[in-house]
Structures are given as C-alpha cells and as structure tokens.
Amino acid sequence: MAQLEQIQESEEESTLAKYLTFTIGSVAYALEIGIVTEIIGLQGITPVPNVPHFIKGVINLRGKVIPVMDVRARFQLEEQAYHDRTCIIVIEVESATVGLVVDAVSEVIDLPEDAIEPTPSLGQSSESRCIQALGKVGDEVKLILDARQLLDSGEAALLNGNASPS
C-alpha cells in the first residue's frame, strides 16, 4: 500500500509546474522557473542609444553585459519610480540573457495542470501577445508570460550583439 501512495505522490508532483510570481502594479504575473537564472536587486543601468523605449540599457553582472527591459514600459503601462522592492529577474531564453525590471517578486508557486487555462482572445496588444496562459491560485489569477514573446527575434538578436540596429 505504501508503494501505491508513493507512486501517486510522484505522479502528482510530475503534473505540477513551478513558476516565479511577481507584480507590476496590482497585476500578478508568473514565469516558468526553468528560464529564471537569478533575481537581483536594482543596480545602475547604463543607457544605450537606438534601442526600443522599453530597453532601459545594460548592466554588468559579474563580467557579463546584460540588456535590461522594463516590463512595465514593454506593456505600455504608466511609468512609475523604482522603489526598494523593484528588482531585476534575469532570464535566459533561446540563448539570450535578459534582465526584466519588475515592481516586486512574490514567490515560487506550484501549479497543477488543471489550474492552468488557455488565454482567452484578448486582442493583439503587446501585453496580451505575451500572455501564454492563466494560472488559478485560490481566488487569484496569475498571468503566465511567454518570455519568448517579450522580445521578438529581431530585438533579441540586437540585444545580444548578433545584429546591428537598422
């Protein structure tokens, strides 16, 4: 009987996905934990000319230069001054490393498959294009982001030094 319980527990664990949750304003978002390399405090960002408005510049993270995107600006939300909970989530997607400035990191959560729903048709705004799914956590809904959509392929290549600005 104990073996059956262990098998059931491992099956339940395998259907759980881990997400890092964070907020921008009053909205809760989530990213698959597998693409997150680290979370760092806000530090000096060096501006770079001729990049999209939501790219705030670059940082030097232990000798590696990393582009930094303000997610609030990416989603065309009202600008807000950075504060003590503002931080940078460093992610790696398709061999591109990017820092995402968010208002605050919340926690890592486990979501079972049945708590994740497809995104309803929300139009073609920059924010809705980046929403991969909706995660239900109690009475709340977390917007699960598709990190690949945060940067289109041309922006990703530009930021990682693989293309020149046009």
Image (cartoon, helix red, strand yellow):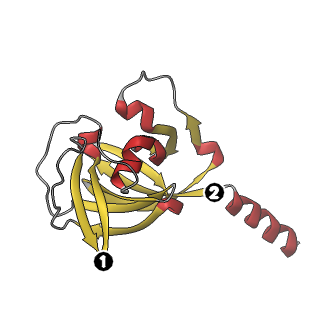
| Residue 43 at x, y percent in the picture | 18, 68
Along the line of sight, the residue nearer the viewer: 51 or 97: 51
For label 2, the SS is strand
- Report the residue that reaches farthest toward the bottom: 62
Above or below, 86 against 144 in this view is: below
Whether residue 140 is visible to the viewer of this picture, yes or no, is no
Q: How crowded is mark 1: few (under 14 residues within 10 Å), some or many (20 or more)?
A: few
Amino acid type for the residue under numbered disc 2: Leu
Relative image position of residue 42 (x, y in whole percent): 20, 65
Residue at 31% across, 63% down: 66
| Front position in the image: 15 or 42 | 42
Task: Please give the label number shown on residue 16.
Answer: 2
Circle 1: element type: loop
* Badge number at residue 81: none
Residue at position x 24%, y 60% from top? 58
**Foreground pick, 88 / 110:** 88
State the residue position of label 1: 63
Picture layout, residue 55 above or below residue 36: above
Residue lying at 49% horizontally and 22% vertically, measured from the top left:
121
Describe residue 20's horizontal placement relative to residue 2 as left or right.
left
Q: Quadrant of the N terminus?
A: bottom right
- CB contact under 8 Å: marks 2 and 1: no
Q: How many marks?
A: 2
Q: Disc 1 marks which amino acid?
A: Gly
The reply to whether residue 3 is in sight is: yes
Q: In which quarter of the image is the C terminus?
A: top left
Q: Classify 10 Å Cα crowding around label 2: few (below 14), some (14-19), many (20 and above).
A: some
